[in-house]
């Protein structure tokens, strides 16, 4: 008698599966192999043009569970996009095989970013019995360099700068074993066969002995070390040795701009910084970015003068781990360059450019293919925001809200990036630095060549800033491709629309230092009504003269005098600033004649003016310094707000700053402290933004607001503007994955170019 079973044996089935996304170079094939073992599924897996193709055969329920797990259990560095399959004939296959990659230039191509050392590798790194004990180049499929070593796709060792290192027997065994953590870990290496560290003195002579120990001793001695990181050289010194930090500032010509600090681990970081759980998590993530956190005062004062927040990061490479444990000091870690130049990557280049800056150079014989700074992030209202998008973030694509034809966004000038887009993918480049020198131009064109090669995108059009003199604009012209000029502030807002997939129209509030407007004047405090195609100026800050043009950026007292003159309180302001009558009269003459002193509606320049008036920052040595210090100085609860006006000038709402400036000068003259004034100034701007957005909503019915521009990296301003708009029923979006500053411009340009070309 046949027994009836309530679990009927399930049918055998076979599926041809395709997985898209960032699935190359992240250990995806070995992961598939392991799943196949677990579910008893037979078949094979391979990479074809960046798509993982799988043939899976087995019991129906096992194949189903296998498919489910492809997404739900994907390895940490993978970004699984689409998983699709077709049923196919079963073939009676046994076993599961991993085939090598196939492919050329067709199809979508993704490159995983570099990832910080994983816990398993870290354990081996400090295990005296491991064959990679204290080996500075340990890595596996879950961690290590990717983008910084890849010369071309598909991602295999022969197309990386590791190809010159012949794997030893033991390494090849690991590399070829699907059950091993290092199966197809392309940069796999060991002390026997891989790259080697060296320490040079300034004359380029190799020092004997253990380079890590020697370097740590130098650092303990207050010396400055150049060291080759993942994407370029860093300069390092002890972050608790004020003399060393000051010396580094002097040599690097960087008088005030805050330095980032690397701490050996989370435990040590807790001793130095006051961090939320979100901040700790971000700090310890695979991105291992610089996170802006509140300082407890344990570091040398010259690390971040005037700042309550410090840029902190944990070690992201084995070399950093080794060095930080050896010194047991928090280390200043800043890019190896003179101020704002692109980061240095080559060994010869390092000798030449860093020889005078460092007391010793720690380097190695693995080449850096792509130049990469550290990423900078911050947690705002519980959400991570990117200020500088570089290591471990780029070149992951930003998903666009529409399919676009191949297009290149050339970016702006400061904190330059470009954006190469096609279909729904926008490959926003890593932060390149200020695009204002030949050096920067080389870094920009190198990176662009690399992106074109890797992602196989040949742009059919270029989008660029309206400013004719930006090197990025000239670069766009030289390509000879059809070009689309895009307003600077429109691009800022479009970047937010791209990131948050907004079709528009939206009210865009774009506050920054400077961008050329479509009327040929300097903009920077703008309210736009815009979609992807176009933007209309709905409001702006009142224009004032910028005495001496760019010179006023370095000398914020000039903006203070210009605003004071506009508000009719020049004399009182000059007294506050301690400027002699002559300085005031020079500015007065510049403002009256307008000579070399253009009108500007810039919010950044307004911050400069208030910062100088309040005595918070009288001279600026880095971009945004007066505004950043004003934010730091602000007393958060300070009330009441200052008076301001909003007037309609020919259909454009103008925020009249004069009553506020007059009141600020009055307060300061009466001896009211800068903290209170700074706090009330922030509060006033929040109200003014809300007011103009409400009037604009009344006229247009639009209740979606996007905030962008460098001024919205100001956390105090941003969180309060967001809260007050939200409380009035607005839907508010800010830059999160992409910098609010000019680093996001190229992404916005791409979306606007698409909008205009669709027309
Ligand atoms: Zn690892
Ligand atoms: Zn080896
Ligand atoms: Fe800007």
Image (cartoon, rainbow, N blue to C red):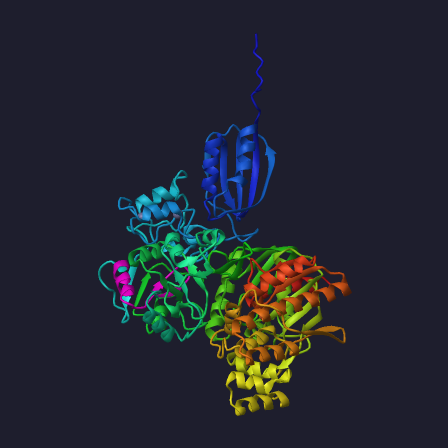
Q: Nearer the viewer, residue 480 or 616?
A: 616
Corner quadrant of residue 537: bottom right
- State the quadrant of the N terminus: top right
Give the percent coordinates (x, y) of residue 391.
Answer: 46, 59
User: Per the image, is 477 magenta?
Assistant: no
Q: Nearer the viewer, residue 419 or 619?
A: 619
- State the quadrant of the C terminus: bottom right
Count of all numbered marks drawn on residues in the image: 0
The answer to whether 696 appears left or right of 248 in the picture is: right
Name which residue lies at 33% across and 51% down.
Answer: 166
Give the percent coordinates (x, y) of residue 626.
Answer: 51, 74
Q: Is residue 355 shown to the viewer in this render? A: yes
Q: Is residue 418 shown to the viewer in this render? A: no
Q: Residue furthest left?
A: 208
User: Per the image, is 221 magenta?
Assistant: yes
Q: Nearer the viewer, residue 686 or 291?
A: 686
In magenta, the rendered stretch is 212-236
Corner quadrant of residue 593: bottom right
Asked if residue 70 is positioned above or below residue 22 in the image, the reply reads: above
Give the percent coordinates (x, y) of residue 672.
Answer: 54, 75
The answer to whether 595 appears left or right of 612 in the picture is: right
Give the percent coordinates (x, y) of residue 339.
Answer: 43, 73
């Amino acid at each position: 008698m046949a027994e009836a079973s309530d679990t009927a044996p399930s049918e055998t089935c076979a599926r041809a599966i395709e997985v898209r996304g960032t699935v190359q170079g992240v250990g995806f094939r070995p992961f598939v192999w392991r799943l196949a073992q677990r579910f008893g599924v037979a078949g094979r897996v391979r990479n074809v043009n960046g798509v993982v193709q799988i043939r899976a055969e087995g019991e129906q329920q096992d194949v189903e569970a296998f498919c489910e797990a492809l997404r739900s259990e994907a390895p940490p560095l993978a970004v699984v996009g689409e998983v699709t399959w077709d049923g196919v004939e079963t073939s009676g296959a046994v076993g599961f095989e991993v085939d090598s990659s196939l492919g050329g230039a067709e199809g979508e191509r993704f490159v995983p970013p570099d990832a910080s050392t994983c816990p398993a590798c870290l354990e081996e790194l400090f295990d005296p019995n491991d064959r990679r004990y204290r080996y500075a180049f340990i890595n596996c499929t879950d961690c290590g360099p990717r983008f910084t070593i890849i010369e071309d796709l598909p991602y295999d060792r022969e197309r990386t700068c590791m190809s010159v290192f012949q794997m030893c027997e033991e390494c090849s065994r690991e590399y070829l074993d699907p059950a091993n953590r290092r199966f197809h870990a392309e940069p796999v290496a060991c002390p026997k066969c891989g790259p080697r560290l060296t320490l040079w003195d300034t004359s380029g002579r190799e020092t004997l002995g253990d380079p890590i120990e020697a370097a740590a001793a130098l650092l303990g001695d207050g010396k400055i070390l150049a060291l080759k990181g993942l994407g370029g050289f860093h300069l390092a010194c002890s972050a608790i040795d004020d003399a060393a930090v000051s010396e580094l500032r002097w040599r690097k010509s960087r008088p005030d701009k805050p330095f980032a600090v690397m701490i050996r681990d989370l435990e040590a970081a807790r001793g130095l910084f006051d961090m939320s759980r979100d901040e700790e998590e971000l700090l310890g993530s695979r991105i291992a970015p610089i996170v802006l956190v509140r300082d407890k005062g344990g570091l040398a004062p010259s690390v971040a003068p005037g700042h309550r927040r410090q840029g902190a990061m944990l070690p992201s490479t084995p070399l950093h781990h080794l060095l930080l444990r050896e010194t047991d000091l928090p280390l200043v870690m800043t890019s190896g360059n003179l101020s704002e130049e692109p980061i240095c990557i080559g060994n010869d280049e390092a000798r030449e450019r860093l020889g005078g800056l460092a007391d010793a150079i720690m380097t190695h014989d693995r080449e850096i293919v792509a130049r990469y700074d550290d990423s900078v992030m911050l947690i705002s209202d519980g959400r991570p925001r990117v200020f500088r998008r570089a290591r471990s973030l780029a070149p992951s694509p930003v998903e666009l809200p529409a399919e676009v034809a191949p297009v290149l966004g050339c970016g702006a000038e400061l904190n330059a990036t470009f954006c190469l887009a096609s279909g729904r993918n926008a490959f926003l480049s890593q932060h390149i630095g200020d695009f204002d020198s030949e050096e920067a131009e080389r870094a920009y064109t190198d990176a662009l060549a690399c992106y074109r090669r890797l992602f196989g995108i040949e742009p059919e059009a270029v989008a660029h800033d309206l400013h004719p003199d930006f090197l990025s604009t000239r670069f766009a012209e030289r390509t000879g491709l059809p070009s689309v000029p895009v307003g600077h502030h429109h691009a800022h807002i479009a970047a937010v629309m791209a990131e948050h997939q907004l079709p528009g129209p939206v009210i865009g509030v774009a506050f920054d230092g400077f961008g050329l407007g479509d009327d040929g004047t300097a903009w920077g405090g703008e309210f736009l009504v815009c979609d992807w195609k176009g933007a209309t100026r709905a409001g702006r800050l009142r224009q004032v003269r910028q005495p001496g043009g760019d010179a006023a950026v370095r000398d914020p007292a000039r903006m203070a005098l210009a605003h004071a003159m506009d508000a009719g309180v020049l004399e009182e302001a000059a007294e506050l600033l301690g400027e002699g009558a002559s300085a005031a009269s020079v500015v007065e003459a510049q403002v009256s004649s307008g000579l070399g002193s253009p009108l500007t509606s810039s919010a950044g320049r307004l911050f400069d003016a208030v910062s100088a008036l309040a005595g918070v920052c009288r001279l600026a040595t880095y971009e945004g310094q007066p505004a950043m210090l004003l934010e730091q100085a602000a007393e958060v609860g300070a009330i009441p707000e200052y008076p301001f006006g909003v007037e309609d000038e020919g259909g454009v709402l103008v925020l009249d700053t004069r009553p506020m400036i007059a009141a600020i000068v009055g307060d300061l003259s009466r001896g009211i402290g800068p903290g209170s004034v700074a706090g009330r100034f922030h509060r006033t701007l929040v109200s003014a933004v809300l007011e103009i957005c409400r009037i604009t909503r009344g006229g247009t019915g639009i209740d979606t607001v996007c905030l962008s521009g460098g001024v919205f990296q100001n956390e105090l301003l941003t969180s309060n503007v967001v809260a007050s708009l939200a409380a009035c029923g607005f839907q508010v979006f800010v830059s999160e994955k992409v910098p609010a500053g000019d680093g996001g411009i190229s992404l916005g340009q791409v979306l606007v170019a698409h909008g205009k070309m669709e027309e």
